[in-house]
Amino acid sequence: MKCQICKENEKEWSWQPDLKSFYLPGNHIRGSIAIAVCNACREKIKAGDEVRYTYKGQEYIANEKPQPLFHPADIHANLWDGGQGIWEPDGSCTMICRDIEADDTNGLGHDVVALVVDPEVAKLFLTAPQLLTCSEALREVLDLLPGETWKRAMKALADLDFARLMN
């Protein structure tokens, strides 16, 4: 059997991503996902490298590094209002979505780029999608601020009149 990650080398291990364990073939824990992997792919996973694999037609990424939900290169992506979702404890939110190409078994699909509580901010993101990247970068900067400074900065952002900014 071939490695389910690189699809080139022969299987040497049974990897169980949910258990974060590797077993010799046939010795894996029953009832858990088992992915056939070669030694080279096992070493990549153990080293913390991002590794893509497919299980039952769904693509996954092992050791996925946090990345912005929306990249500057995506500014021409077609964003659309995905309707209302539930955001606890504040109530509802607007789901900002984009079309993506899924693998051959899934056809075309979509993913949720952001959940936005303020409807005016949602309109702003739909009008100027690059602001999603800016807002994520700003949030990362704000997270570096100490206690009271962070609270004042977040309050100032919350008090912005986004409706006025859109006109």
Image (tube, helix red, strand yellow):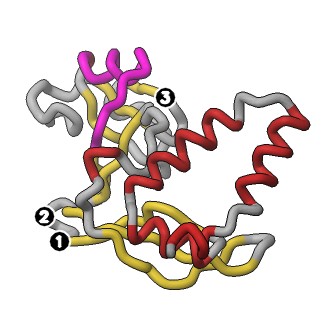
Circle 3 residue: 21
Disc 1 from disc 2: Cα separation: 5 Å
Q: What kind of element bears circle 2?
A: loop
Q: Residue furthest right?
A: 148
Residue 90 falls in image quadrant: bottom right
Q: Are marks 1 and 2 in contact (CB under 8 Å)?
A: yes
Who's the residue at 22% across and 69% down the image?
Answer: 106
Tell me residue 100's x, y (percent): 25, 63
Disc 2 from disc 3: Cα separation: 29 Å
Magenta span: 40-53
Q: Residue furthest left?
A: 8
Is the residue marked by circle 2 packed among few (<14), some (14-19), or many (20+) residues within 10 Å?
Answer: few
Tell me residue 15's x, y (percent): 38, 33
Q: What kind of element bears circle 3?
A: strand
Query: 101 or 127, which lies in front?
Result: 127
Who's the residue at 24% across and 17% down the image?
Answer: 40
Circle 2 residue: 104
Q: Is residue 147 above or below residue 38?
A: below
Circle 1 residue: 107
